[in-house]
Image (cartoon, rainbow, N blue to C red):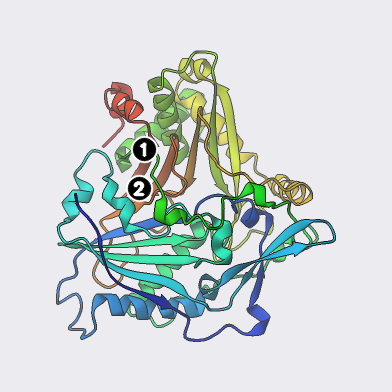
């Protein structure tokens, strides 16, 4: 059995401490609603740098990454902080805020002595060894009151390097996560000031007049696991398998054209067409009864759905869950176009007014979910628009992206841009039985590259 060997562990801090005016950042309803779910875990696989790519640098790749990470924390300083929990005695509630105290980021250098890139890319199912490329498996976001908000593990393989990041979801959503990764890679590549034109924005101006900070929430001890339970030490991955489904640019275009043609419209996007295709296949191969209610929950970015828009550089969460509901019979009796159109309508319905009302309603009656899973539901997070393959640390583009075990359940479909422009990849976490049935599903597999 292959094991990962830890070489060193260190704490990386910003070189410059934030000033007092920026030390406290309030957590919004979008941030607080993920307190009881896992950290984000995403990582990139690279081919091993050649001596020429390292440009004769006397320092090792590991030391170089530590230095450039520290530079990144000078800009994205909240990542080196901690959450603070405050008990409100007056109304028996709890509040949280982000303290930018520069306690630091956890950084681990590891080695997989006998692991090669092909071991990661060639198996049909994502190998379990990928789970060991990430730190803090199973740790929940509220635990950021005592644990680092960011933990980085750099694992050297025989012929590659994997950079795995575990990041507190209360502090950043997917957009902000990849903003961090992009900034770090630019510093590593030699750009002295990658955010000079687009500095990160930490202010919560959008919430003025909508939410009073700090938000008071019912957060009782009965909601959370025993603090003494070191879940990252004893965490057992869920009994599911994961497979990467790759949709080429050509196949994506064909699905989009088919979906729009069936409905006689032009509104259905490429991603919505692929989502519809996946949903129909999963329901078909789970052998759901005709009248069984099926759900698709979609993480919908709100930055561009409100007026005025939140800048892409806004650091925090700006996501809500869209919810599509139908029956298995309806889903399968209708064509791809009808299913994609249901998804399109739910996404399009997230207007400025609806987003503001959702924030207001949540602040008045906060609901903190322990899990996002459901036996008959699918959930898609991430985005095919994130800049994943532009993360060049100085030795070339990544060759693959993978995620850890955080927030995985039967029905989690994580979307990424594919390696080629216009292509889309899905990391599908499903039961082995469902994945095997999908592989034998001619209608589904025909749309794969």
Q: Is residue 232 left or right of residue 251?
A: right
Q: Which mark is residue 253?
A: 1
Residue 251 seen in render: yes
Sequence-wise first label, 2 or 1? 1
- Foreground residue, 295 or 192? 295
Give coordinates of residue 101: x percent, y percent. 58, 78
Q: Is residue 253 left or right of residue 203?
A: left
Q: Is residue 377 above or below residue 126?
A: above
Numbered circle sitting on residue 422: 2
Q: Name the residue furthest front.
A: 228
- Residue 238: quarter of image: top left
- Disc 1 secondary structure class: helix
Horizontal side of 370 relative to 392 (left or right) equals: right
* Residue 197 in view, yes or no: no
Q: Position of residue 127 (x, y in %)?
A: 26, 45
Question: Residue 98 occupies which quadrant of the picture?
Answer: bottom right
> Are circles 2 and 1 on residues that touch, CB within 8 Å?
yes
């Amino acid at each position: 059995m292959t094991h990962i060997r830890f070489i060193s562990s260190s704490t990386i801090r910003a070189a410059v401490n934030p000033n007092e005016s920026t030390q406290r950042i309030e957590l919004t309803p979008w941030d607080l609603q993920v307190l009881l779910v896992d950290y984000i875990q995403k990582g990139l696989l690279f081919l091993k740098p050649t001596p020429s790519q390292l440009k004769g640098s006397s320092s090792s790749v590991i030391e170089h990454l530590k230095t450039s990470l520290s530079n990144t924390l000078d800009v994205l300083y909240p990542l080196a902080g901690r959450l603070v929990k405050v008990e409100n005695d007056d109304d028996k509630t709890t509040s949280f805020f982000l303290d930018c105290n520069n306690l630091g980021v956890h950084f681990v250098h590891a080695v997989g002595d006998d692991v090669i890139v092909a071991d990661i890319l060639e198996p049909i199912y994502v190998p379990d060894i990928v789970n060991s490329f990430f730190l803090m498996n199973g740790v929940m976001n509220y635990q950021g009151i005592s644990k680092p908000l960011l933990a980085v593990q750099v694992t050297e393989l025989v012929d590659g390097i994997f950079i795995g990041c575990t990041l507190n979801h209360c502090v950043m959503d997917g957009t902000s996560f990849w903003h961090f990764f992009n900034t770090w890679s630019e510093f590593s590549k030699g750009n002295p000031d990658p955010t000079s034109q687009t500095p990160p924005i930490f202010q919560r101006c959008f919430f003025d007049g909508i939410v009073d900070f700090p938000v008071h929430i019912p957060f009782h001890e009965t909601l959370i696991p025993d603090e003494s339970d070191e879940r990252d030490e004893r965490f057992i991955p869920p009994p599911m398998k994961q497979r990467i489904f790759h949709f080429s640019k050509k196949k994506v275009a064909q699905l989009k054209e088919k979906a729009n043609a069936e409905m006689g419209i032009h509104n259905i996007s490429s991603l919505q067409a692929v989502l519809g295709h996946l949903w129909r296949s999963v329901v078909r191969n789970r052998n759901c009864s005709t009248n069984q209610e099926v759900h698709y929950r979609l993480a919908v970015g709100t930055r561009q759905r409100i007026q005025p828009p939140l800048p892409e550089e806004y650091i925090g969460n700006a996501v809500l869950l869209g919810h599509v509901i139908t029956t298995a019979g309806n889903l399968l009796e209708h064509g791809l176009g009808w299913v994609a159109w249901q998804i399109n309508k739910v996404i399009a319905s997230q207007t400025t007014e609806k987003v503001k009302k959702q924030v207001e309603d949540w602040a008045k009656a906060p609901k903190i979910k322990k899990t996002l899973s459901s036996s008959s539901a699918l959930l898609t997070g991430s985005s095919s628009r994130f800049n994943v393959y532009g993360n060049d640390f100085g030795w070339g583009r990544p060759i693959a992206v993978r995620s850890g075990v955080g927030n995985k359940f039967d029905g989690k479909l994580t979307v990424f841009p594919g390696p080629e422009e216009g292509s889309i990849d899905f990391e599908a976490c499903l039961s082995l039985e469902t994945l095997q049935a999908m592989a034998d599903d001619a209608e589904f597999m025909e749309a794969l590259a």
